[in-house]
Image (cartoon, rainbow, N blue to C red):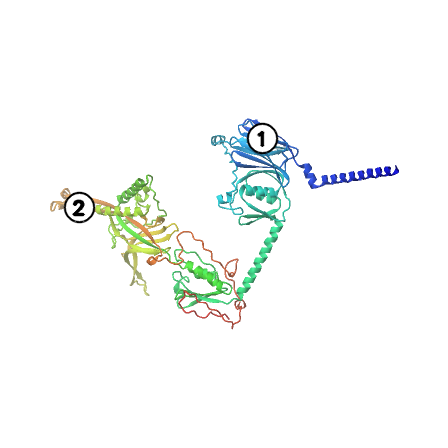
Amino acid sequence: MAYIKTFLAATARGALVLLAVCSLQLLALGDSPVGAAAVRTPVATSLRAITSGETTLIEISGTAPMPFTVRRPDARQLVVELPGVDASQLSASYSVSSPLVATVAVKRALRGGDPVASLEVSLRAPVRERSRLEGSQLVVELTPEASDASAAEGGAQARPAPSPASPNQTPQASQGSQYGQPGFVGEPINLNVVNADIRDILNYITEQYGVNFVVDSSVGRVPVTINVTDVPWNFALDSILKANRLGVEVDGNILRVATLNVLKDEAKIRAEEEAARANLREAQLSNAPLVTEIIRLNYARAGGTLAGFAGSTADFAGGKTPQSFSGGSGGDSSGSSGEQGILPIIARRLSRRGGIEVDGRSNTLIVTDVKENIDSIRRLVQLLDQPEPQVEIETRIVIANRNFSRDLGVQLSAAVISARGGNAGFNTSSGIDRTRTGNPLIGTNPFGVPQGIQNPSGSSLGANAPNTVIGLTTGIFGTAQISALITAAESKGQAKIIATPRVTALNNRPAQIESGSQLPVVTPQQSAGGASGVFTTTFVSVPLRLSVTPQITDAGTVILHVTMENNSINLTLTNSLGTPGIDTQRMSTEVLVPDGGTTVVGGVLNDRESETQNRTPGLGSLPVLGNLFKRKAVLRNSDEILFFITPRIYRPDYLGRRVENAPSTGTNSVTIPQPVPLGNPTTNTPVPTTPSQQQQQPQTAPVIIQTPAATQTETPPAPTRP
């Protein structure tokens, strides 16, 4: 009996101990994160739809605030995802009596052991969505999209609904840019989540917009709370990363997310490695042998003027380049390689040990540098030493009556209107500057140009474009039509071609056409005694001068810088020695002309007045009564000088052979590597070099001389520096 009592007491004590242990385990489980998460898992308890006017509200009630995301697969479907929400108490489908919503289907799934619920809302019409959390209740507000008419009447423009890209099409491809590039704007996104993990948000962006993310191991669990509507996804991503002190590194089409400290440390390590490689490379090049190469230029100028270098050589070492050669200038009207030639362009790209010499007699560059830099300079010279296209400028100088330019302008305008069914597409030149001195005079210069040119207020220069040919610019078909009209006017006596000069000029080089006479001007010289017995004769040109500078554009058109000057002798303006005056009229303009087109410069008038008298022989000489047998006639003629300028472009394709490495018409982008550090990376100009820096190897060390295959001249030994 005592044994039984002892056994029962021990059993009771064991049961109490076992109960205590189980209680402690339950308490520990409740205090653990897993247990707390299990206890705090939100549960969706009910769902209802409320219709109020044009607005439909879908309310989901739960036991706790529920994280959610909203996406739009298409215009007639809306999906509300509830990660970590238990929706077992909801029905599988709900029918809604609303003009906007047809049904709401509830889908349940497990993701990583956690419940995931999604509400698929079938829409009857396109809607605008706005979601919000009100305590433990999620409210999805749906309103109809405003039509164009109602938006115009209301004075506000409806915001477009977001349209996520399909998995097979990324927005980067449609926009032509990627995340991280300037000006990139992603597709709009709607997010309203509370304490969602950043990895879930990145996965959502990947699924919707096809962006590849890699999360660094330095990024732990980052809870994100965000509520944005119709915001570009890249803006939302930048805000999330900035708020959590995270950064992103773009590597092609992969975005790597890491902490800012990790990215800074990696950038510092990369900078140190790059500096170490640069120092090693510079040390290797400092000990590399120098190479001398002779580069003969065919079209470009070595220096500013070849005459300045003829018979001598100029030395420009990497550290001794004069200030005038610190940088090359772009091509202008004075030269194809700038006013200073190609020399300063090459001098800026020499290394600290490099040097350049110019033989002006043969227009040759003698470059001494390491082999890597020599190759880069040779490629640059091949691109720059190219023949410039030429422009043939045909000018027809026409004297016509004042009605000719007006009739010609009307005929050209009518032809264009008839061909196009609209208004004439001509351009009017501008920038005309006229200067005139003296009085009108009857007569012509020895070269047939009328004197006494004047431009009264009634000139056709001030007429409208459709009523005059002056200022018109035509294409190649207009050029042929103008030629036919001028020929017809000559046959009718309305116009006369007095000169048709032609000249060919290089691109951006001026071409000048001049014709005229030399006017002797006598000037008295004072002798020692004060008498002016010595006279000096100076000849002054009185020309008709036309200066044209063509500039070829990449579009195949020509910009003409035209300057026209007409001078004539005025015998009514004389000094005490009988030297006549000079009437001058000058015109300057810039005009854009198509290849083979024609532009018209004019407005120079010549008014002539002549008087004729007829009388009866014998009776006409009687006093008083003789006037009855006389007849006087005054003839007034007004002529106009017109310049028809036609440019034609000739490309550098001699004998049908294409020029090697000749740049094509259009925008070119050529990358030439610079393997050797320049003299000064800040200013990109050579740094003054001391003899110890230039002499990196012993004086007795051999110097390698490399002659290019294309060079047929004998290569002299490389110069050694003291």
- CA gap between label 1 and label 2 equals 116 Å
Residue that carries the numbered disc 2 in the rendered image: 613
Residue 143 locus on image (x, y percent): 54, 31
Q: Quadrant of residue 133?
A: top right
Mark 1 vs 2, N-terminal side: 1
Residue 630 locus on image (x, y percent): 15, 44
Residue 570 seen by the camera: no
Spot the residue most to the left.
618
Give left or right: position of 2 versus 104. right
Q: Amino acid at mark 2?
A: Gln
Give left or right: position of 179 versus 592. right
Q: Nearer the viewer, mark 1 or mark 2?
A: 1
Q: Quadrant of residue 619?
A: top left
Query: Observer-nearest residue: 621 or 476?
Result: 476
Q: Quadrant of residue 294?
A: bottom left
Query: Observer-nearest residue: 367 or 547?
Result: 367
Q: Give the total number of marks visible in the rendering.
A: 2
In the rendered image of this protein, does residue 296 appear above or below residue 188? below
Residue that carries the numbered disc 1 in the rendered image: 93
Residue 519 seen by the camera: yes
Query: Badge 2, how many Cα within 10 Å: few under 14, some, many 20+?
Result: few
Res. 9 mark: none
Identify the residue at image location x=60%, y=54%. 268
In the rendered image of this protein, does residue 261 appear above or below residue 104? below
Residue 411 locus on image (x, y percent): 28, 42
Q: Amino acid at mark 1?
A: Ser
Give left or right: position of 397 versus 309. left
Residue 599 locus on image (x, y percent): 32, 48
Spot the residue most to the right.
2
Of helix, strand and loop, which one carries label 1?
A: strand
